């Protein structure tokens, strides 16, 4: 029998099954395989009519079904299962074939896997796919990394199944070699954490200061969603806040345990940022906020700590605060995107990926959780200035964030005065102020380091590295 399938998908849990359906709906003949055959059977039984599927009951059968060069998408659990699946397939594939890992792999694993398969002449495309189950079926944001040849072989299919941005562009772009795609996906998730935390802080402060019910605050988010904050997450927030629990009739948000969970990509983002020496304080505060929310013993102990008495604003001041919070939310959001994009830029330099940040902003405009109208402007900023050292170096963003700085400060100081935690707002503002401060106290830090550890310091008035013998006050030029 001649191989008939254009592409294969192995791993048919929610993501793999929907990606296979998306491909089939676009006219591809899709070979499908899953370790447990029941998933393959149910995919064909429920959705076989959507297109042409070839059921494969083994890796060997999958390989035999694929046209050459073979294109195989692996959609299994990240980590060990992905290694197991690659180990099973690699001996069955030929040079020139492509393996796509569409799971949430750590980019370092992707680099290792790409190098190992390259030795055998097999291409490996580490591909971040965002948008969850729904996105996989109807158009995800796709972030591939790998050799140009690997991307060339997959580009038509990925372009066909990707989400479509408001201006009609598919949300897919080749982002660089080996781990670039999974790196960008990881930072996407980190930014998602920051976005969600900022929204949560905005809601919390408004509720605390105004006494408004969640349904009323939902209206505020609905209104914000018509402006520059227009985004999937703001839209979702309005829906959630307006929702009432069917059992109790209470606002839905009030019946949910206030301990947020995480799967780990936010943590990876922060760990990697620490390794690269890049400050992503907004993302870090968001990860820590989720962690702290789950530390029930710490929080129980904390309830005894004193804080300020709550005050409730009248309608006029509540309306004014709402406007200020919009400004604080927008400015803080710009800072967390600037930090995440800086992290991608730094990783691109470290790993030789040469990532086009305009393309990154472009692929985040559809199909993914952080899709937002303002990403059009982020893309435009990096198109106009590909070498921008920061998103804040773009005159448009610098102007907007500068305009927001006063209300932003009022929001952070009001929250602080009233004892409402706003770690992400405050971290974003501190980042902004650090950037604009001409002389930082880092000079003192450096002097302290020289004092107790002879770590040397550099001077403002002449080149070289120096150390003071603190006992004799004698300055020595340090050997380079
Ligand atoms: P899961 O992450 O829940 O993984 C389940 C799949 O992995 C099943 O097909 C399972 O086969 C297979 N599998 C495992 Br577990 N160990 C295996 C092994 N040793 N050999 C072969 N197959 C193995 O599936 P998912 O939620 O569809 O996600 C797939 C990938 O996409 C993951 O990497 C995930 O992180 C990523 N992702 C998920 C989402 C989402 O919203 N769920 C979004 C974006 C990315 P079995 O049926 O035989 O147990």
Image (cartoon, rainbow, N blue to C red):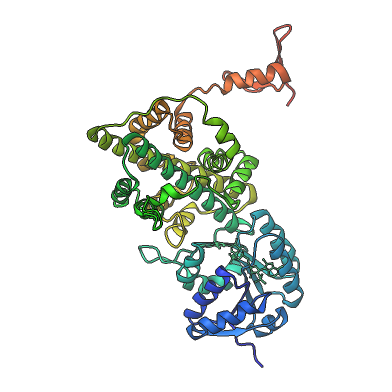
Question: Which quarter of the rendered image does ligand 1 occupy?
Answer: bottom right
Q: Position of residue 332 (x, y in %)?
A: 42, 39
Residue in the image at 51% along x and 26% along y: 305
Q: Farthest residue in the front direction?
A: 248
Residue in the image at 45% along x and 40% along y: 335
Tell which of 124 and 409 is nearer to you: 409
In what quadrant of the picture does the N terminus appear? bottom right
| Count of all numbered marks drawn on residues in the image | 0
**Position of 165 relative to 273 (above/below):** below
Q: Can the viewer see residue 225 in this picture?
A: yes
In what quadrant of the picture does the C terminus appear? top right
Viewed as shown, does residue 257 lie left or right of 384? right
Tell which of 328 and 257 is nearer to you: 257
Q: Position of residue 396 (x, y in %)?
A: 35, 42
Q: Position of residue 359 (x, y in %)?
A: 47, 57
Viewed as shown, does residue 28 lie left or right of 165? right
Tell which of 245 and 6 is nearer to you: 245
Q: Position of residue 471 (x, y in %)?
A: 73, 7
**Position of 413 relative to 118 (above/below):** above
Residue in the image at 65% along x and 63% along y: 77
**Position of 205 relative to 243 (above/below):** above
Q: Can the viewer see residue 388 in this picture?
A: no
Q: Farthest residue in the top direction?
A: 472
Q: Examine the image and state in which quarter residue 476 appears.
A: top right
Q: Farthest residue in the bottom direction?
A: 1
Viewed as shown, does residue 71 lie left or right of 161? right
**Position of 321 relative to 62 (above/below):** above
Q: Examine the image and state in which quarter residue 246 appears.
A: bottom left
């Amino acid at each position: 029998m001649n191989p008939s399938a254009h592409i294969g998908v192995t791993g048919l849990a929610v993501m793999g099954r929907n990606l296979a359906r998306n491909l089939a709906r676009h006219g591809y003949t899709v070979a499908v395989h899953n370790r447990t055959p029941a998933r393959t059977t149910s995919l064909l039984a429920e959705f076989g009519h959507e297109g042409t599927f070839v059921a494969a009951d083994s890796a060997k059968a999958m390989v035999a079904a694929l046209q050459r060069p073979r294109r195989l998408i692996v959609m299994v659990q990240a980590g060990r299962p992905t290694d197991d699946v690659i180990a099973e397939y690699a001996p069955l594939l030929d040079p020139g074939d492509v393996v796509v890992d569409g799971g949430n792999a750590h980019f370092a694993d992707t680099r290792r896997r790409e190098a190992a398969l390259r030795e055998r002449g097999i291409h490996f495309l580490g591909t971040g796919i965002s948008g969850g189950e729904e996105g996989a079926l109807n158009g995800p944001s796709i972030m591939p990394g790998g050799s140009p040849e690997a991307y060339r072989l997959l580009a038509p299919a990925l372009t066909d199944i990707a989400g479509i941005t408001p201006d009609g562009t598919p949300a897919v772009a080749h982002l660089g070699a080996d781990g670039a795609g999974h790196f960008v996906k990881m930072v996407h998730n980190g930014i998602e954490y920051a976005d969600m935390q900022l929204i949560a802080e905005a809601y919390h402060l408004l509720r605390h200061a105004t006494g408004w019910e969640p349904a009323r605050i939902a209206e505020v988010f609905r209104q914000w969603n018509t402006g520059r904050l227009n985004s999937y997450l703001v839209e979702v927030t309005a829906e959630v806040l307006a929702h009432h629990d069917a059992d109790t009739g209470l606002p839905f948000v009030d019946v949910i345990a206030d301990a947020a969970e995480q799967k780990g990509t936010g943590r990876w983002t922060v760990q990697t940022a620490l390794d690269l020496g890049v400050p992503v304080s907004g993302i870090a505060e968001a990860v820590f906020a989720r962690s702290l929310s789950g530390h029930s013993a710490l929080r129980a102990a904390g309830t005894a700590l004193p804080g300020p008495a709550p005050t409730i604003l009248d309608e006029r001041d509540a309306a004014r605060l709402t406007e200020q919070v919009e400004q604080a939310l927008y400015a803080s959001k710009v800072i967390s995107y600037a930090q995440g994009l800086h992290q991608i830029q730094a990783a691109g330099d470290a790993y030789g990926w040469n990532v086009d940040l305009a393309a990154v902003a472009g692929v985040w405009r559809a199909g993914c959780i952080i899709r937002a109208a303002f990403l059009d402007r982020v893309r435009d900023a990096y198109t106009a200035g590909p070498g921008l050292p920061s998103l804040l170096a773009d005159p448009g963003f610098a102007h907007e964030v500068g305009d927001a700085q006063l209300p932003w400060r009022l929001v952070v100081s009001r929250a602080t005065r009233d004892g409402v935690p706003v770690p992400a707002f405050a971290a974003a503002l501190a980042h902004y102020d650090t950037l604009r401060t001409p002389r930082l106290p880092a000079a003192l830090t450096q002097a302290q380091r020289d004092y107790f550890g002879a770590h040397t310091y550099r001077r403002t008035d002449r080149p070289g590295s120096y150390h003071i013998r603190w006992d004799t006050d004698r300055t020595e030029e340090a050997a380079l």
